[in-house]
Image (cartoon, rainbow, N blue to C red):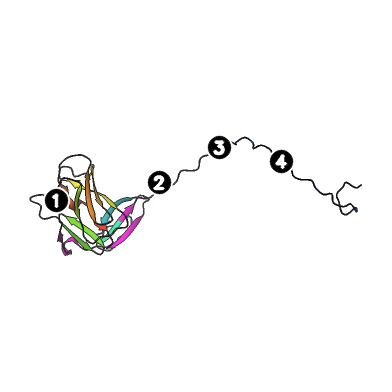
Amino acid sequence: MCDCNKTSCGCKSVPQGEQGVQGPQGERGAAGANGLDGDPGISVVDQTVSDGVTEIGSTVYPLNSLIIELSDGSFIDAGIISPINELVWEDITLLNSWTATPGFGTPQYAIDNNFLYLRGVITPGLTNNAFSIPGILMSANVLETIHDTSNPAPINSIFILDTIGSVRILNFAGTQDDFMLDSVGPISITR
């Protein structure tokens, strides 16, 4: 009987037997190394309206262009916005006992070229739901800082425009200061 299992020497192949039972699972290996941290993401650092002359990030943009500076050092030209004195202003209907602060006129909003503008000063009411802007549908909430009348730095207060145009002002300082709507820059919206 030939046991070389080669067909070239005239041997026939030898049939193999059945496979045996699988042995027990081996010990678990050591954990792999942690992956690299992901990028921290990009956020808005500042927004500026171009005067048409001064460089913003080494570029002179057309007059009244809204330029958004990002945390990665890049700039976005969000488009031309109208000068404030050319806007058509509508009175804001305040909710939940929020009131117009005496001496600052009626709080108002204007919408132009898909940008929302605000002006006036308002006094807090019973809840943080201050007012709504009709006809706005947003894909996401917009968070902005808002200045109060006692502190020009917006340290403790957040302005939120939600997806259906409702505006909330969160006052983390707990003070009863009035809020300056003018301190919220133009907001890009959808209608």
Disc 4 residue type?
Val
Q: Which residue is mark 4?
A: 21
Q: Is residue 52 visible?
A: no
Q: Quadrant of the C terminus?
A: bottom left
Q: Residues within 10 Å of mark 1 (few under 14, many from 20)?
A: many
Report the mark closest to the observer, 2 or 4: 4
The kind of secondary structure element at disc 3 is loop
Q: Are marks 1 and 2 in contact (CB under 8 Å)?
A: no
Q: Which amino acid, mark 2? A: Pro
Residue 19 occupies which quadrant of the picture? Answer: top right
The extreme right residue here reads 1
- Label 2: how many Cα within 10 Å (few below 14, some 14–19, many 20+): few
Magenta-colored stretch includes residue 183: no
Q: Which label sits in the foreground, 1 or 2?
A: 1
- Nearer-N-terminus badge (3/4): 4
User: Mark 3 — residue?
Assistant: 31
Mark number displayed over residue 40: 2
- Mark 4 vs mark 1, CA separation in Å: 81 Å
Tag 3: amino acid: Ala
Question: In the rendered structure, which disc, 1 or 2, sits on the residue that comes first in sequence?
Answer: 2
Q: Which percent across, then down, holds residue 25? A: 64, 37
Q: Are marks 3 and 1 in contact (CB under 8 Å)?
A: no
Front-lying residue, 126 or 136 = 126
Q: Amino acid at mark 1?
A: Val
The magenta span reads 68-93
Q: What residue is at 20 percent from the left and 51 percent from the top?
A: 183
Q: Which mark is residue 121?
A: 1
Image position of 172 (left or right of 1): left
* Residue shown at the point (85%, 51%) measured from the top left: 13
Q: Earlier in the sequence, mark 3 or mark 1?
A: 3
Q: Point out the tag, 3 or 2, that comes first from the N-terminus.
A: 3
